[in-house]
């Protein structure tokens, strides 16, 4: 009887007992047992993102080797189904140009000054266009994604885009764009659509648009030699990023922001006509989509700077 009573008391006491586990030990054990926890997953994702950023940054330096990487990324990336332009890169604060700046004929003394004088005398009519406000030397991006060196002359009424041979020192052609025809000025990052194999430019540009409500023939758009596209796109001249380009006056000629500022002011100062149908020019900041998906020819063209007048070994063209 005594033993039975003791056993009943022991059982009763055991039923009332509790078992406690240290929560810190549990968390540590969970981290050891489950290395793929959500926290670690975030770290892995951020690490992968950094690797991707570094990869796309390297593509700017070697675009030809970047094409296979972009092909595999397009095939395996399931999150790129959106048709809007992707922003995989951030704008680089500076692009280092290490080659000899004198390889560009425009960097040589008095060459650019002579070109400006000739183009001003031949292409501008001060009575109709007004006096020259500012001149710039920028890179024009064609609708086929080819970079070309162009001289820009800005007056109160007109923007002149001139093609000049800085080697032979002769004028090759020009195009006049009345400022009142410009319907939209877009300033922003130059991007390519999703699915494009072209390496990102990592820089900004400006696009001037006219006749935007008038449809144009797509056959003319697919003609690389057609010059009747109702928009034009510009970006910095490569010498803007060269370490030896320290003269402020010369650097201003290559500067995209200076061009946008002067152009915007000239458009805003245009005299307003009483035409009801005429809408004012729209100025906005957004991505500028370059509609190019493959463009092997433009990659080779831009990689070798064939749109600029340079010294190339024993030859100059």
Image (tube, rainbow, N blue to C red):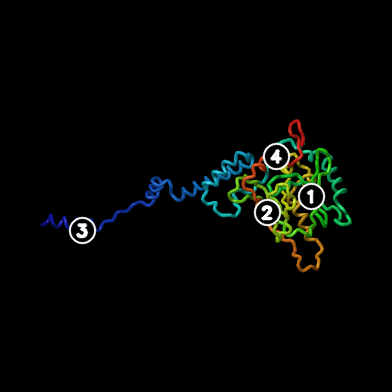
Label 2 environment density (alpha carbons within 10 Å; few <14, some 14–19, many ≥20) = few
Judged by depth in the image, the label closer to the viewer, 3 or 1, is 1
Q: Residue at x 81, y 55 (%)?
A: 158
Which residue is most to the left?
A: 1
SS at badge 4:
loop
Determine the CA span between mark 2 and mark 4.
37 Å
Foreground residue, 146 or 281?
A: 146
Expressed as whole percent of the image width and height from the top left, the position of residue 29 reads 38, 47
Label 3 environment density (alpha carbons within 10 Å; few <14, some 14–19, many ≥20) = few
Residue tagged 2: 218
Label 1 environment density (alpha carbons within 10 Å; few <14, some 14–19, many ≥20) = many
Which residue is most to the right?
A: 127
Judged by depth in the image, the label closer to the viewer, 2 or 4, is 2
Residue tagged 4: 97
Determine the CA span between mark 3 and mark 2.
90 Å
Expressed as whole percent of the image width and height from the top left, the position of residue 232 reads 73, 52
Q: Which badge, 2 or 4, comes first in the chain's sequence? A: 4
In the displayed structure, does residue 180 sit left or right of residue 80?
Answer: right
Determine the CA span between mark 2 and mark 1.
24 Å
Determine the CA span between mark 1 and mark 4.
25 Å
Which residue is most to the front?
A: 219
On screen, residue 210 above or below 313:
below
Q: Which badge, 3 or 2, comes first in the chain's sequence? A: 3
Contact? badges 2 and 4 (CB < 8 Å): no
What numbered label is drawn on residue 140?
none
What numbered label is drawn on residue 12?
3
On screen, residue 214 above or below 52:
below
What numbered label is drawn on residue 161?
1
Expressed as whole percent of the image width and height from the top left, the position of residue 55 reads 58, 42
Judged by depth in the image, the label closer to the viewer, 3 or 4, is 4
Contact? badges 3 and 2 (CB < 8 Å): no
Judged by depth in the image, the label closer to the viewer, 2 or 1, is 2
């Amino acid at each position: 009887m005594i033993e039975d009573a003791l056993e009943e008391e022991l059982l009763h006491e055991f039923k009332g007992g509790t078992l406690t586990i240290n929560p810190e030990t549990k968390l540590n054990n969970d981290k050891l047992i489950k290395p793929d926890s959500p926290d670690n997953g975030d770290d892995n994702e951020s690490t992968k993102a950094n690797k991707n950023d570094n990869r796309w940054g390297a593509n700017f330096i070697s675009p030809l080797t970047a094409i296979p990487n972009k092909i595999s990324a397009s095939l395996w990336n399931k999150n790129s189904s959106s048709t809007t332009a992707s922003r995989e890169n951030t704008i680089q604060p500076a692009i280092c140009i290490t080659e000899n700046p004198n390889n560009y004929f425009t960097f040589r003394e008095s060459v650019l000054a002579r070109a400006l004088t000739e183009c001003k005398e031949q292409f501008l009519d001060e009575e109709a266009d007004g006096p020259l406000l500012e001149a710039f030397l920028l890179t024009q991006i064609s609708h086929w994604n080819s970079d070309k060196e162009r001289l820009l002359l800005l007056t109160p009424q007109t923007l002149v885009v001139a093609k000049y041979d800085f080697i032979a020192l002769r004028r090759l052609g020009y195009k006049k764009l009345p400022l009142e025809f410009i319907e939209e000025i877009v300033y922003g990052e130059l991007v390519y659509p999703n699915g494009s194999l072209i390496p990102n430019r990592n820089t900004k540009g400006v696009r001037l648009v006219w006749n935007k409500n008038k449809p144009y023939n797509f056959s003319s758009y697919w003609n690389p030699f057609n010059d009747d596209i109702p928009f034009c796109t510009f970006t910095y001249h490569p010498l803007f990023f060269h370490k030896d380009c320290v003269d402020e006056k010369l650097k201003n000629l290559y500067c995209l922001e200076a061009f946008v500022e002067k152009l915007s002011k000239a458009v805003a100062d245009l005299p307003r006509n009483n035409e009801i149908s005429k809408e004012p020019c729209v100025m906005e900041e957004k991505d500028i989509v370059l509609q190019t998906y493959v463009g092997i020819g433009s990659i080779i063209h831009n990689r070798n700077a064939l749109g600029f007048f340079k010294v190339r070994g024993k030859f100059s063209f």
